[in-house]
Image (spheres, rainbow, N blue to C red):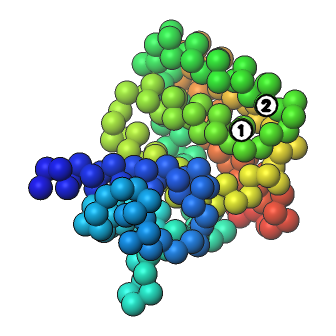
Amino acid sequence: MLREHSLATLAQQELERRIISGEIAAGAKLNEVEVAAALGVSRGPVREAFSALSQAGLVRVEKNRGVFVRQVSIEEANEFYEVRAALEGLIGKLAARRISIDEIEQLRTVVRRMHLTQKGRRADEYFALNVEFHDLLARAARNNALLAQYRGIVNQLDLYRRATISRGADNIPVSTQEHEAIIDAVAARDEQRAEALLTEHVLVSRERLHAALGTPNPA
């Protein structure tokens, strides 16, 4: 039973990685037999992984039809952005209070890589660095409950954002500057400024996404 549980966890983590990275596209149907063969496990762990991914909001299970990677609507994405803005604000406040010098340097390293990426407008690479930056910051807040909530929202939102990321390549330089300002506030232990900058960063990101899609930005 322990081995089966461990295999289910590994299957879940690998499927989650492939979904979040875009390797498995939104809307794709997941065949239990094919997934089990691809991962080298039996069907039991795969079923458990599907159940866990459904609870995490990454797949949907349709009776008599099967399991599909979730497709996030623009309305759902707007709601996720609002929740993420609140969570990121709290992350900024706590990170400014608790972050270590080593973690600040890790953030600066990510931003230096962002600068290299922006020269070629390589949207996919920038997307991965953006995820890395914000996850580092979330871990620096030293609050596991907050980290879990944050990752859950981000994983679902990224299902939507990855499909549209190439349309926002022109915004990479501005976004990179915003990340630099966030680091400066956190490094200065300015909790209020870090909170405000991160909240604004998320909401402005939503505005840029709507502009790229040509859809109205919600109030």
Mark 2 and mark 1 lie on one chain; the one further toward the N terminus is 2
Q: Amino acid at mark 1?
A: Glu
Q: Position of residue 52 (x, y in %)?
A: 33, 61
Q: Tell me the residue at 44%/74% (across/down).
A: 31
Residue where numbered disc 1 is placed? 125
Relative to 176, 191 lies left or right: left
Q: Tell me the residue at 28%/63% (across/down).
A: 42
Q: Position of residue 134 (x, y in %)?
A: 56, 35
Q: Are marks 2 and 1 in contact (CB under 8 Å)?
A: yes
Asked whether residue 16 is in view, the answer is yes
Instruction: For label 2, count other residues whose C-alpha is less than 10 Å away and answer few (under 14), some (14-19) or many (20+).
Output: some
Q: Position of residue 108 (x, y in %)?
A: 65, 17
Depth check, front residue: 210 or 130: 130
- Which image quarter is the C terminus in? bottom right
Q: Tell me the residue at 39%/90% (across/down).
A: 64
The numbered disc on residue 117 is: 2
- Residue 116: image quadrant is top right
- Which image quarter is the N terminus in? bottom left
Relative to 29, 119 lies left or right: right
Depth check, front residue: 126 or 134: 126
